[in-house]
Image (tube, rainbow, N blue to C red):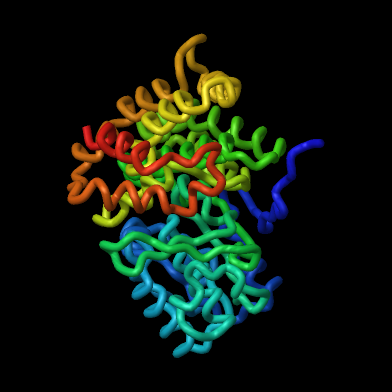
Amino acid sequence: MAAAMNPLIQYPRVLFDFGAVRALPGELENLNVKRPLFLTDRGVVNAGVFGKVREAMGGAQIVAFEDVPENPTVDGVERALSLYRERGCDGVVSVGGGSVIDSSKAVAVVAGHGGRIGEFLGQGGKVGPKTAPHIAVPTTSGTGSEVSRGAGIHPSSTERGSSIGGPYVVARVAICDPELTLSLPRQLTAATGMDALSHAVEGYLAKANNPVGDAIALDSIRRVFTWLPRAVANGGDREARWHMMMASMEAMLVAKGLGAVHALGNTFGDQGLHHGTLVTIAMPAVLRQMEQKLGEKIAERMTQMAQAMMLEPGRHAAAGIADLNERLGLPSSMRAYGYKLVDIEEVAAACHESHFNQTAPYHPSVDDYKELIRELMG
């Protein structure tokens, strides 16, 4: 008998291409949203990207919350909710990267259901069809949150995140316009692009049986290795930006789950460091340990990933990722990135308890995680 398929494969309506943001007013009308709250952050505003969205709205007066923090927090969500309620909003538009989109998902959930965000974290079963309409407009090519069923929210900027997820967390519409990524700085282009790769890699290796997702994952991996170096070298390369936005979206369409890379990245996310950089530092070590533990059970998939990365025969996917990190100027260790390890026992235990292990092909022990942490610290 074939292995069980995922119980649900669900994607939003997606509009994808240069100029897609011009469809925003019509999509709001389709959802009968007359007074949306726009969520964004200061970086998107200062780069002039949010101004392009304002232009797409035809000069209409809009309600905007422009202070989403770099990592999504309970406080940021609650402040946005206060504005939503104060101004009588009836929907949400997110304009930004993963932090903005995840914060917007949380706002939409609580706006529709009532209460406070803390009541829903880790309680996906509480989230139903009352969720307010949400249109996601990504401005990075990394998290793929515009098409995912989850959102990570931190209690504060220096605490590890919790999550909110389920079919009613998904944005109703994703408007993916690569034009909005052209001004993304070099370092963020690299880090967010490798975040997309981490989703494709871990999604491909996750234990659920989803052949459609596997095919999408391999295509995403190939796009990242082909186009990310070009996007980093020249942010104005429109072809590279198109392919990287597609790779990012594809990586989250895999819909199989993640694994130890994200258990580590989320756990190391307690010091305000960028998530995309954390997970890409973790990837090579996790892949090496995984093959050591699983051997032939995972060998074919490792080979298929290496082929998608266009590596020479016999070269391991972990080595390909480490090489790409170096080419892009990303740090090779958590220590080099600035992470200060206080208690390896506590960090390893937190990684071991992470929900990301549930979908991974194997669940590392606390000792396995300690081994990984020592290697990652360098």
> Residue at left 52%, top 35%?
201
Q: Quadrant of residue 329?
A: top left
- Residue 110 shows in the view: yes
Is 40 placed above or below 211 here? below
Image coords of residue 13 (percent x, y): 68, 58
Is 87 placed above or below 8 here? below
Q: Left or right: 35 with respect to 267?
A: right
Is 321 placed above or below 157 here? above
Q: Left or right: 138 with respect to 24?
A: left
| Front position in the image: 305 or 242 | 305
> Residue at left 64%, top 68%?
168
Image coords of residue 227 (percent x, y): 48, 30
Number of numbered markers: 0
Image coords of residue 174 (percent x, y): 60, 58
> Considering the image in quadrants, where does the C terminus appear?
top left
Q: Quadrant of residue 25?
A: bottom right
| Front position in the image: 55 or 364 | 364
Among all residues in the image, which is located at the extreme top? 313
